[in-house]
Amino acid sequence: MTTTMLDLEPMTPVVGAIAGDIDLRVPLEPDTVRTIRRGVLDHGVVFFREQDLTHEQLLAFMCNFGTPCMDPFAAVEKPVPPESTIVDMHTLPYRRATSVWHYDSSLAAEPGSIISLRAVEVPPVGGDTCWSSMYAAYDALSEPLRNMLDGLSAAHSGVKTLSLMSGANYGSMQENMVNVHPVIRVHPETGKKALFVNELWTERIVDLEPSESDHVLAYLYEHVKSPAFMIRWHWKPNDVALFDNRAFQHYAVNDYDAPRTMQKSILAGDRPFGPR
């Protein structure tokens, strides 16, 4: 087991930390697991450099933090065991869908909780990923607006995502999945409030008139783009990002035209709940 005390270096006051020297291919001590989990909860995303992991090794690492699951957006005809998947992000449909600020598969009844990405192949320039703190985004709103949003709910579906991914050859996807979640989510571990609408999956705020919903969502989608809430990560091969999909959105910058391949694993989550 890894016995070295793990250091985490914060990248900004609200999001991102870089882990010190650690080998994720070997079993981790309980104290190290707790440090990593605390880092993900506190910083939203923790980065590990130089991690040449097999599918099995990535899954073993992820099992320290929860139960691996399949992407809820992927429809399957029969149950299959969860696994880490290799995702070709160079295809145009995928690039269109991921270059929008989003949580992963927030249309699910229980969206994934913690997600890992490992860079298998990266372009020589471009292809960065940004993360944004929805804690900070919520806290930056005025109190009257926060009070209003605290009591609202929004429908999430794949309508916009399927449109952006038109022409993709990704097999079956959940075309009819729709779930209603609170606009403001209370994190099940930290107890903090986070903005839980996103431009990729959120269809409408169900408590408002359509025109009101459109205007409120348009404002919130712009609000989360503030540089004060985010970091930008330039990938190198074998970089690993472990991030909290419950309170931090991400955005894959579509500025590359070369192979970009990621190894991805998702942990099962729970149904979002709000402050009211």
Image (tube, grey):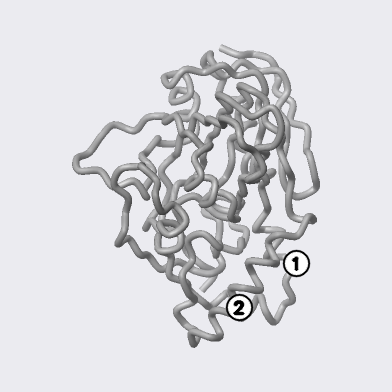
Q: Kindly identify the residue that appears in the image at 34 percent across and 46 percent down.
A: 74
Q: Quadrant of the N terminus?
A: top right
List x then y, in percent, for residue 142: 74, 76
Q: Distance between the Cα atoms at labels 2 and 1?
A: 15 Å
Is residue 260 found left or right of 203 in the rendered image? Answer: right
Between residues 211 and 30, which one lies in front from this camera angle? 211
Mark 1 sits on what residue? 140
Mark 2 sits on what residue? 216
- The answer to whether residue 91 is seen in the rendering is yes
Q: Kindly identify the residue that appears in the image at 65 percent across and 42 percent down.
A: 129
Q: Kindly identify the residue that appears in the image at 43 percent across and 65 percent down.
A: 156
Circle 2/circle 1 CB separation < 8 Å: no
For badge 2, the amino acid type reads Val
Is residue 138 found left or right of 114 in the rendered image? Answer: right
User: Helix, strand, or loop for circle 2?
Assistant: helix
List x then y, in percent, for residue 219: 66, 73
Between residues 232 and 188, which one lies in front from this camera angle? 232
Is residue 262 found left or right of 142 in the rendered image? Answer: left
For badge 1, the amino acid type reads Ala
Q: Residues within 10 Å of mark 2 (few under 14, many from 20)?
A: some
Q: Residues within 10 Å of mark 1 (few under 14, many from 20)?
A: some
The relative height of residue 52 versus residue 162 in the rendered view (above or below) is: above
The relative height of residue 144 versus residue 87 in the rendered view (above or below) is: below
Between residues 75 and 169, which one lies in front from this camera angle? 169
